[in-house]
Amino acid sequence: MSIFSYSEWDGTQDLFDLDQDELMDELARNLMYDGDMAYSLWKMQRHGMRDSQGRRLPGLQDLIQRLRQRRQGQLEKYNLSSVMDEIRKKLEDVLKTEREGIQKRLEEARQKTAEGRQETEGLDSEMQEKLLKQLEDMAAQNLEKLDNLPSDIGGQIKELTDYDFMDAEAQQKFQELIEMLKQHAMQSYSQELTQRIKDMDPESLAAMRHLIEAINQMLEQRMRGEEPDFEKFMEQFGDFFGPEPPQSLDELIERLQKQMAQAQSLLDSMSPKDRQALDDLLRSMLDEATQYELAKLSANLETLYPSDRLRQRYHFTGEESISYTEALKLMEMLQQMDNLDSQLRESQFSHSLDDIDEDAVREFLGDEAAEDLERLRNITRALEEAGYIQRKGSGYELTPRGIRKIGQKALKDVFSQLKKDHLGLHSTNRRGIGTELIDETKQYEFGDPFNLNLQKTIMNSIMREQTLPVKLTPDDFEVFQSEEMTRSATVLMLDLSLSMPMRGNFQAAKQMAIALDGLIRTQYPRDTLHIIGFSSYARMMKKEDLPYLGWDEFDPYTNIQQGFQLARKLLSKERCSNKQILLVSDGEPTAHIEQGQIYFQYPPSLRTIQLTMREVKYCTKQDIVINTFMLGESQYLNAFVTQMARLNKGRVFFTSADTLGEYILVDYMSNKRKHLE
């Protein structure tokens, strides 16, 4: 028993339908113009597509655009100057607390002295005055020091390091500020290591320094071509890395590089003044030995694995404040976005989506985008499962079914007015003994093919004599009628010269050729079709290669003469009375071959026209009809096709690249024009 679940419409049900036939139609459109399977599939993934309901599957370009908008939103949200503002505010709070504490102590001491109170027994009023004087002198000295602090934050913190605080709360706040700055200084090299250390006391800093020394030793061993003992390193320092320690030296190096690049990107994205102030301040938080090891670590990593590609400078324009730790996390997120952006862009050139991090897509663009990515990946799988494409080496090719699908749009008009021939399948207006059965029936006559319609035959017997069992007589027999058919041998000559794509005609010509091939394959399988492509030279082409057909780049000439020669040779081997050449071009002949030498000229030379017309005469003598599909009009072209049609008695179809459903038929046999659809 099937169980169905229904829910209220909320928009999430409007999903793109990955229909196999629609995918094939989109692939066919791309192949029509590009002629390259890999490139056509890539275009579908890059640009996306719409289904029959108008729903759109976003392509890689859409995902890239959405990712960049998300990144730009972060840049327009935050103000990196606030990183220094946070430190500045904490320092101002320390100074304010110290000043208020000094003032409070003075007021309390003066009040006690005035009231004659003594904190310690045995002290007389003179001693109290002396102690008050000492306190006032100390307060004056401290206030003078506070008033004369340097203007920059780094200088102020350096002076306050040796300052004797009079207020315990101010001293505590200053120590917390120093601890925070030490954390920031170490975070510039490794955030995960500093997270394992709660207090940045001398003992903890010494342990960190020993860890960095050990990493430097391994890096120097690798630079010498030696293999470091990473397992021994982890036995000694594994506790620094938490629940997800690196599994190899390469993984550790990658982590360190990314985190150092994030800190450097943060500095690079700040204003020059804030950048210098923060850099100097963080460096001042570490002792010389630790600074030395960190500098060596940075140099060793850069020597082994340059990290310029990881460092980016971002232009922040927002107003929202952000702390140093939050800014580092933001840099990590922007770095991951940049990496995903690179994956999406590189996939457009590698024609593969396998290297795109789906988890990153889901994190930054949402579940729907991750599902869209999966649909893009499934395009080739869906086409392959439908039997339209198949693997060939590292790429894909069309299957016979795919080729038939592309050629469904037929050009039956080409086969009108053809002479009757035996065993073909081209309809005439007479009923006869051909091979194609139709729905109409007739009473059997001697000599008719015995294609019996059993249902009508039995009904004739029942209508004649309503008894059982049914008894048949020859008069009851009713047979299917058949159409008298013709058979044709065709050579399709397709112009591949540069003018075809330049004038926007190549795709229309290719569509016509594929439609004709599809028509013959599906409805006239006994007919013969040969394909000749021509520009400066003419050559035979396989019908299976039509979907991949492209123009001849940098070749503007049309050698129709050689095309006719090759077509005559092919048709001379065919045993049928209906032989024709279909010429698809947008230009007059501008090349010919004479005595093995090729000649080019535009406008066409008289000799080129003469030799081409000589081939037309040869075709006419061999009863080969030349039907011409012209994708353009010009003085030379019109004169050429007019003369050719008069010699051959064939027809000329003037059409355009915009629509092949409508074209102007110039029928020189009837000397009049009419519109066909």
Image (spheres, grey):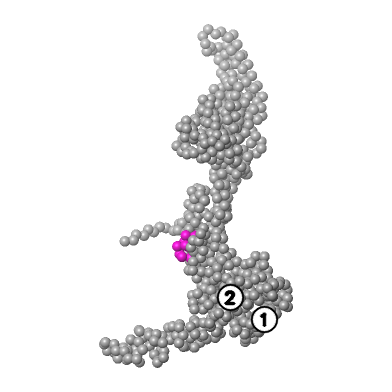
Q: Nearer the viewer, residue 652 or 129?
A: 652
In the depicted structure, whether residue 255 falls above or below residue 430: above
In the depicted structure, whether residue 624 falls above or below residue 105: below
Q: Tell me the tag on residue 248.
A: none
Residue ID at (57%, 55%):
349
Q: Amino acid at mark 2?
A: Leu
**Disc 2 + disc 1, Cβ < 8 Å:** no
Left or right, residue 354 beside residue 154: left
Q: Which residue is mark 2?
A: 492
Residue ID at (64%, 22%):
145
Residue ID at (73%, 76%):
605
The quarter of the picture where the C terminus appears is bottom right
The residues tagged by marks 2 and 1 sit, at their Cα atoms, a distance apart of 19 Å
Instruction: Please tell me whether mark 1 sits on a helix, a strand or a loop.
Output: helix
In the depicted structure, whether residue 110 falls above or below residue 633: above
Q: Is residue 210 in view from this perspective?
A: yes
Left or right, residue 554 beside residue 14: right
Q: Which residue is mark 1?
A: 614
Q: Nearer the viewer, residue 33 or 456?
A: 33
Q: Which residues are magenta?
A: 379-388
Give the image quarter of residue 140: top right
